[in-house]
Image (tube, rainbow, N blue to C red):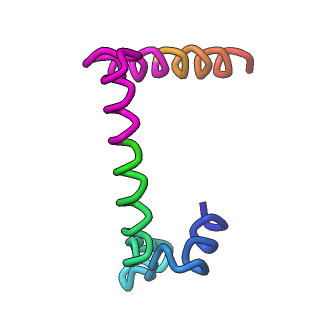
Amino acid sequence: VSYNLKKLVEMGYMHHQRCEMDRRSVRVRLTERGRDVRDVVTDLFGRHASGLQDKGVLGPDGIDQINHALKRVERYWSDQIRYIY
């Protein structure tokens, strides 16, 4: 996480500041440039979700069903890894 945060700060997408009370903690926030990227991605996701629904690829609850299925797959994989060792 530290490496990725450092790169995002260097590229001007994130701002970070050490907490004065606990120097191990860092407060992070998006810069204006980071918020612009977030807005673009949010708009893109919204257009794609609408397109999937408009073309009948997914119904109104399709994304919820996919998320639920992916969470079950993640839980299965986590259990498999946990019981290997």
Q: Is residue 7 above or below residue 71?
A: below
Q: Magenta-highlighted stretch: main secondary structure?
A: helix
Q: How many marks?
A: 0
Q: Can you see residue 4?
A: yes
Report which quarter residue 54 is drawn in: top left
When asked about the image quadrant of residue 67, the answer is top left
Query: In the image, what residue occupies the spot 45% across and 81% down?
Result: 18
Looking at this rendering, what residue extends furthest in the left direction? 60
Tell me which segment is drawn in magenta. 46-71
- Give how far across and how far down residue 42 sits, in percent: 36, 51
Tell which residue pokes out farthest to the front in this image. Answer: 55
Q: Quadrant of the N terminus?
A: bottom right
Tell me: 66 left or right of 74: left
34 in the magenta segment: no
Viewed as shown, does residue 61 lie left or right of 26?
Answer: left
User: Which residue is drawn at the image coordinates 41% and 16% (left, top)?
Assistant: 57
Q: Residue at x 46, y 78 (%)?
A: 16
Q: Position of residue 76 (x, y in %)?
A: 56, 14
Front residue of 16 and 11? 11
Q: Position of residue 74 (x, y in %)?
A: 54, 22
- Depth order, front residue of 13/57: 57
| Residue closest to the eye, 43 or 2 | 43
Measured as percent of width and height from the top left, residue 26 is found at: 45, 73
Q: Would you say residue 51 sits in the magenta stretch?
A: yes
Task: Report the quarter where the C terminus lies.
Answer: top right
Q: Residue furthest bottom?
A: 20
Quarter of the image where one finds residue 83: top right
